[in-house]
Image (tube, rainbow, N blue to C red):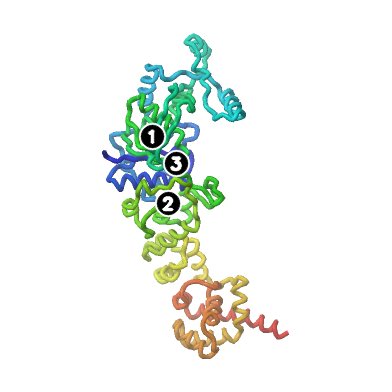
Amino acid sequence: MTVRTRFSPSPTGMIHLGNARAALFSDLYAAKHDGHFILRIEDTDVSRSEIQFVESLQEDLHWLQINWQEGPGVEGQHGPYWQSQRQEIYGKYYKILEEKKLIYPCFCTDQELNLARKLQLSRGQAPRYSGTCRKLTEAEIAKRLSEGQKPAWRFSVPAHQTIEFTDTVKGLQQFKSDDIGDFIVRRADGTAPFIFCNAIDDAMMEISHVLRGEDHLANTPRQIMLLTILNLSIPKYGHLSLIVGDDGSPLSKRHGSFSVHEMRAKGFLPIAIINYLARLGHTCDTQELLPFAELAKHFQLDKLSRSPARFDPVQLMYWQKLAVQSLDIPAVWRWLGETIQNTVPENMRQLFAETIKANLEFPEDAAIWAKIFFHENVQLDEMEADIVREAGEQFFVEAELAVDKFGMDLPAILAEMKQTLGVQGKKLFMPLRAALTGKAHGPELAQIAHLLGAKKMKHRLSRAFKLASIQQASGTE
């Protein structure tokens, strides 16, 4: 059997980490088994679907290295891959259900349905359709239709049945049909809701495995009933544990979650995100930074966790840092973007990228260092100013003399200052770093010296001398 998986988003917003993880896992599983990964656009909700979201989700998936073998832009024999273009297919199966008298018109209004739902909840009952319109006679149906009422169509759920399947993540699942209310398979406007068209499309596209969020678990017995009655193939379902924040609630922006689009804009690297997601609710037997093809080799359905996957921003940043450090210098330079490229002199670009690479998480970090190295002055925060004041004015006198003598040869400068001042370690390095960069921590001082040049070094040491002099004068008084 050829493995065929799919990702079927509704284009009603930007892709977030939960969507991206479902797409990634589906693609990894297909790739591991030399199968096919399909992208299908579920755009039957006309009021909320927008073409801009379709374009954005395709860009985000390609950026994450999640590529489909069938779908928009990659036509195959199972298309079209837009549900809005598949209404004729759905109509064929509506007709079969109607001929078998397995569906019936429902004229209940939203207000009536909401009222019934509230009543059931108040009685401690699970809300489900009570079957009001199932009891209508043909004459009653004809009368309502003649009055211009437009019904939705519901599937008649058979009584006293057990729907059973083995979930590839959660194991054996059993549902009683008596607990499942008759559900809508065709809206009043003639369009197909998710439960119906999603199941039909999976069968028609020969999907072998469905990996989706556990919030869809309750839909699965309904879809199995439909596919069984229509004599269509049923995929193997696997329901992924949801991603939650530290407080156990569904992941949201307050937990540090962003859309993939926002993460791209911030400067996250795609390999960092897919390596993080590949270990979010999935046990991977290696902690190396891996490209997509290698991640696929390590992906296993039996390693998917049944427990909620806890979003950990610290772990996400671990993979981001690892990804940045894996870049070669030309790749770092491309990643930094035009703003940095236009700030750094061309003859300094290689040295700049080499110098700051170890201190980077995002391009915005490089902007800070570009300002430090290529603007005239630096601003010292209170902590760095205290370091300069504590070093004293003599420290910076000797530092300027050493620069006069040795230029940008930092080892020689440090050796000279160590001898003349009798200081070493942090007492030598930290005041010098604070004076030159305005930071207590950062890149190697030797590379900093070459980026600044002797003239700028002396200028900043002179400013530090003045700051230290003010402190000394204040202390004398």
**Where residue 36 sits in the image (x, y, percent)?**
30, 42
* Residue 82 against residue 469 in the figure, above or below: above
Q: Is residue 162 above or below residue 30?
A: above
Q: Amino acid type of disc 3?
A: Gly
Q: Residue furthest top?
A: 139
Residue 85 location (% of width, % of height): 38, 30
Labels 2 and 3 touching (C-beta < 8 A):
no
Front one among 132 and 77: 132
How far across and down, in percent of the image, does residue 450 sit?
Answer: 44, 77
Quarter of the image with the N terminus is: top left
Residue at (45%, 40%) from the top-left corner?
A: 214
Q: Secondary structure at mark 3?
A: strand
Pinpoint residue 346: horizontal percent, then vertical percent: 41, 68
Residue 213, numbered circle: 3
Q: Nearer the viewer, mark 1 or mark 3?
A: 1
Out of 397 and 217, give the one closest to the viewer: 217
The residue wearing badge 2 is 277
Neighbour tally class for label 1: few under 14, some 14-19, many 20 plus, Cα within 10 Å: some
* Element class at badge 2: helix
Dot 3 alpha-carbon crowd within 10 angstroms: few under 14, some 14 to 19, many 20 or more: some
Which residue reaches farthest bottom? Answer: 420
Disc 1 is placed on an element classified as strand
